[in-house]
Image (spheres, rainbow, N blue to C red):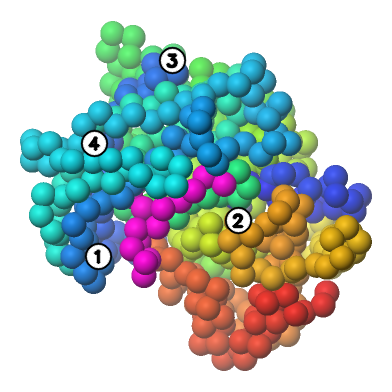
Amino acid sequence: MKKFLSFALALICLSFALFQAGCKGCNGCNKDKNRTKYLIDVTIEDNLLTGVETVDFYNDFSVPVSHLEFNLHANAFRKDAGYKPIASQYINKAYKNGFSYGETNINLVTCSGENLPFEIVGQDKNVLKVTLPKEVFPNERCTVEIDYSITLANVVARTGINEHTVNLANFYPILCARDSGGFYQCLYYSAGDPYFSDCADYEVSVTTNADIVVASSGKLISQKQTNGKNKCVYKLNSARSFCLVLSDEFKVLKDEQDGVEILYYYYDDADAFGSVDTTKKALKLFNEKFANYPYSTYTVVQTEFLQGGMEFPGLVMISDALEHEAYLEVIVHETAHQWWQTMVGNNEIEHPFLDEGLAEYSVVLFYEKYPEYDMRRKDIISSCEKTFRLFCSITDKLDGEVNTSMLRGLNGYSSEYEYVNVCYVKPCIMFEYLRQSIGENKFFNGLKKYCSTYAFKNATPDDLIGAFESVGANANGFFEGFFSGKVII
Ligand SMILES: [Zn+2]
């Protein structure tokens, strides 16, 4: 995800201000063909995206399904949104040219040529509900076609037009993930990453003006230019979402690591080769430590972004506003999310610390492995401890109490300061203490077990505990102490 503690800065300045708000050997992505498939065809012209999305829904639930629910994340940018997508402290940076709004319009939903009834529901017009012509039983499929359009706001955000790029996260209605309560409707909280979706197979066709360079989550499988337009088709299997970034300023560097094609799109990076080198090092290390990266391409994109960066399957956004050291660190953090969020999913609204904590600790592993970055594990953890203690001290003085429970959803945090400390800093300390407590073998075996057991599935905090217990680490009490907030750091 995006907001992160910059270790580089943490060593210099331990204060509130240091927080930047911010297929090779494919192991499983193609084995299970029983996934929902998206066929998306979009055209982008100025601030309007028009699309037709064919969703071949596969019911992997244990009960019949009579309707489908899709999150409409891009609808959060409309004028009357109840949940504002931009936190108040970022308004001026996000809306550089004044307030601007976007919205999603659903024009038609059909099944085999027949119109289907649909409605926009959810607490904040955030969900498209489509009634199916008949119940879809477990292991059965049903195909629906959605004709839609999205007006893009001029806003520096995951979805929107900014000075240099067009960020196109969530540019289509995406099926809500399903848990024991049914379809999970995501509210677009401004803090954290308000997402939860299941893996699916994607084929995405994008038509733009011919001078636009497209960075994509998937592998390019065809490209055609006609009448000043460029049409690219991409594929990506077993992904939780699909993301695009467009720009007429992009330069591209290509490289390779462990059989994975690396693509780096940028417009302002004096050390572009260094950025690619860091990406390669991160992929190499995490391939060794966790599991093989699951896709055939990995795309790193420089773009305008309010926080440090943002992860999507096969593609990460890195903020062009970062200083060099922080820029490289964010590349590592977002790359780690390819294992902790892209591969092992979790409900980012309910348990945001799960993937953020592991991504942060993966950065520690990176610095430990590559001493040339001049960041030592001991110093980083020490900085985290000081930072967290300062947070506790300040919060105690201001509020008279400190809640350090990690088992909170995004709506349980009263400030970004609290969110960053509990979801990033504290779990980073937790994983270091766990490693010291159970030893190297059990620690890394536990991480591998967690990754292999929940790859392309969704994990919970209990599943994390279970993975370490299954490799012989008596970790239940340890984790419970951290999760509940009882442990004093
Ligand atoms: Zn993150």
Amino acid found under the numbered disc labelled 2: Asn
Amino acid found under the numbered disc labelled 4: Ile
Which residue is the site of mark 3?
46
Is the residue 194 above or below the residue 289 in the image? above
Mark 2 vs 1, N-terminal side:
1
- Disc 3 element: loop
Q: Nearer the viewer, residue 327 or 165?
A: 165
User: In whole angstroms, how far apart are the C-alphas of marks 4 and 3?
Assistant: 22 Å
Say which residue appears at 8% left-offset and 37% top-offset. Answer: 114
Say which residue appears at 40% left-offset and 35% top-offset. Answer: 171
Pair 2/3: label in front:
2
Q: Residue 70: give its label.
A: none
Image location of residue 393, percent across then percent down: 90, 64
Which residue is the site of mark 4?
146
User: In whole angstroms, how far apart are the C-alphas of marks 4 and 2?
Assistant: 31 Å
Image location of residue 330, percent across then percent down: 67, 46
Pair 4/2: label in front:
2
Answer yes or no: is residue 235 visible. Answer: no
Is label 3 in contact with label 1 (beta carbons under 8 Å)? no
Q: Residue 60: give its label.
A: 1
Amino acid found under the numbered disc labelled 1: Asp
User: In whole angstroms, how far apart are the C-alphas of marks 3 and 1?
Assistant: 39 Å
Q: Main secondary structure of the magenta part?
A: loop
Say which residue appears at 35% left-offset and 44% top-offset. Answer: 121
Numbered range of the magenta stretch: 174-189
- Disc 2 element: helix
- Disc 1 element: loop
Which residue is the site of mark 2?
411
